[in-house]
Amino acid sequence: MRRARWLAHPAGVGAPAVMRDWLTTPGSLTARLIAHSRQFRVQKLRQAGNVCLADEADAIGLARPRRVWEREVLLRCDGQPVVYGHTVVPMSASASDWPLFSALGERSLGTTLFYDPRVTRGALEFARLRPGHPLVARVHAALGRNAPARDTYFARRCVYRRRQGLLLVTEVFLPEVLDLEAAAFNMNTNTK
């Protein structure tokens, strides 16, 4: 099982400039996706207990992979999946640390995180996920038959803190996210 090499700067992952722009989105990615589409939807794939990935354990303060609460979603713009989201919360986190996590359903986690004054956001980390990494397999499974045989995906992750609880959000950017910029540009030029 391949581990990702998470870096503090997006230039280290070799992403094209337009993808780097998405990777470094300040604030809420959800808000940016909403602004670049006519219809935004969170498609919840799974939310349950599971063993975290090896490269997630360290980020959330675990000495080795252990059981965590896990949430997997696809973020869709105008019906098209553009981002695969993977969130893990240590089992030691209490309901008072993350009171809305278990009841999110198909609501955006981002809207909860960015509007709660008790939540602090850590530094973004960036990676190029290659075949063999478990998240690449999960992306392909989430996309089903339409999954393109991509060599790599670009991703970012961030640890959020609320009270004593940690929460790690990893966002894997699908190539279709780049079409949103082109569509937004075409909409702006057609309205002038």
Image (spheres, rainbow, N blue to C red):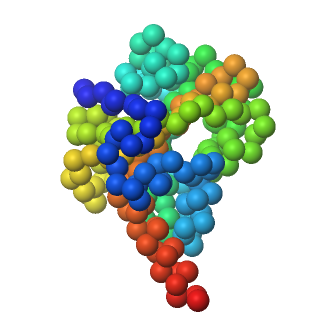
In the displayed structure, would residue 14 be above or below residue 92? below
Depth check, front residue: 183 or 141: 183
Q: Is residue 93 left or right of residue 85?
A: right
Image quadrant holding the N terminus, namely top left
Residue 92 in view here: yes
Q: Is residue 139 left or right of residue 168?
A: left
Image quadrant holding the C terminus, namely bottom right
The spot of residue 115 in percent (x, y) is: 74, 45
| Residue plotted at (31% across, 39% down) | 129
Q: Is residue 18 left or right of residue 101?
A: left
| Residue plotted at (54% across, 51% down) | 25
The spot of residue 22 in percent (x, y) is: 47, 54
In the displayed structure, would residue 138 be above or below residue 29? above
| Residue plotted at (46% across, 75% down) | 183
The spot of residue 143 in percent (x, y) is: 34, 54
On the image, which quarter does residue 39 sit in?
bottom right
On the image, which quarter does residue 162 sit in?
top right
| Residue plotted at (58% across, 59% down) | 32
Residue 83 in view here: no
